[in-house]
Image (cartoon, rainbow, N blue to C red):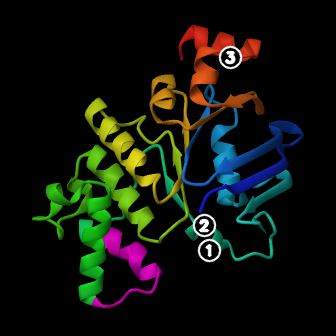
Amino acid sequence: MSGSIIRIQNLNVSHKGIPILKDINLTISRNKVTVILGPSGCGKTTLLKCMNRLIDIYNGLDISGQIHLDGEEILNRKNDLTRIRQKMGLLSQRPYPLPMSIFDNVAYGLKIQGVRNRTELADRVEYYLKQVNLWPEVVDRLKSPASRLSIGQQQRLCLARGLAVEPEIILADEPTSALDPLSSTCIEEQFMKLKEQYTILIVTHIMRQARRLADHVIFIYLGEIIEQGPPAEIFDNPQHPTTKEYLRVGH
């Protein structure tokens, strides 16, 4: 199924009168990698948190506008928050495996979906660990604590746990910033494969990563979308002076 999956209209977020996001209008395409690029503190993470309603946990924020997911207005307070969040797997800046075994980290997500049969659990844990290319590294120690994995392995485990709830969208917030180059490459490779099944939004300030992964680039500066388009257009022929300066400095 092609076309758009998320449509954002006139989204504004402020804290005590100070704007964080200003008049955001966006369409996110299905089964593509959309990269949200910009300097630290420009509103990238806030935009992601609006999409999965994690913005709700912060007090004192004023939010207006609309975010439609498959036509459903997800900022509507009457909507089922758990169901909305299950549609969006979140990969944070640092991995946060649950304090349990490797197996149980992935099984946790499956049990949320109602899977209880032991054989089915085992088969599907294997499936999701293979999806993130972690299975060969952990097959002999599934019952050992997830905390014993390297940080790069933990990030892939968290990705597997997120995929297990069968989301439509993967939201990745600086997903490789805490990883070594080899682990970063591994995560990037998984994203390129996963976009066949999922829509992926990646927040980053690393231009090389954006160029490698993006089907579409959105450049945000001081809470506003300054420019967006295909990566070749943004990186090789930016139109806005702010974009040109950001790229010139080489963030």
What's the distance in space between the residues labelled 3 and 2, CA to CA? Answer: 34 Å
Three-letter amino acid code of the residue under disc 2 = Arg
- Secondary element type, mark 1: helix
Image quadrant holding the N terminus, namely bottom right
> Which residue corresponds to the image point at 41% horizontal and 45% vertical from the top-left?
192
Outermost bottom residue: 117
Structural crowding at the residue carrying mark 1, measured as other residues with C-alpha within 10 Å and reported as few (<14), some (14–19) or many (≥20): few
- Secondary element type, mark 2: helix
Please tell me the numbered disc located at residue 59. none
The segment highlighted magenta reads 104-117
Residue carrying label 3: 238
Three-letter amino acid code of the residue under disc 3 = Pro
Whether residue 89 is situated above or below residue 173 in the rendered picture: below
What's the distance in space between the residues labelled 3 and 1, CA to CA? Answer: 39 Å
Q: In screen coordinates, is 123 left or right of 36?
A: left
Q: Please tell me which residue lies in front, 159 or 95.
A: 159
> Which residue corresponds to the image point at 63% horizontal and 42% vertical from the top-left?
45
Structural crowding at the residue carrying mark 3, measured as other residues with C-alpha within 10 Å and reported as few (<14), some (14–19) or many (≥20): some
Is residue 58 visible in this depiction of the protein?
no
Mark 1 and mark 2 residues within 8 Å of each other at the beta carbon: yes
Please tell me the numbered disc located at residue 82. 1
Q: Residue 26: where, in percent of width, then height?
A: 76, 44
Please tell me the numbered disc located at residue 85. 2
Q: Residue 110: where, in percent of width, then height?
A: 40, 77
- For marks 3 and 2 on the same chain, the one whose residue lies earlier in the sequence: 2
> Which residue corresponds to the image point at 23% horizontal and 46% vertical from the top-left?
150
> Which residue corresponds to the image point at 38% horizontal and 40% vertical from the top-left?
188
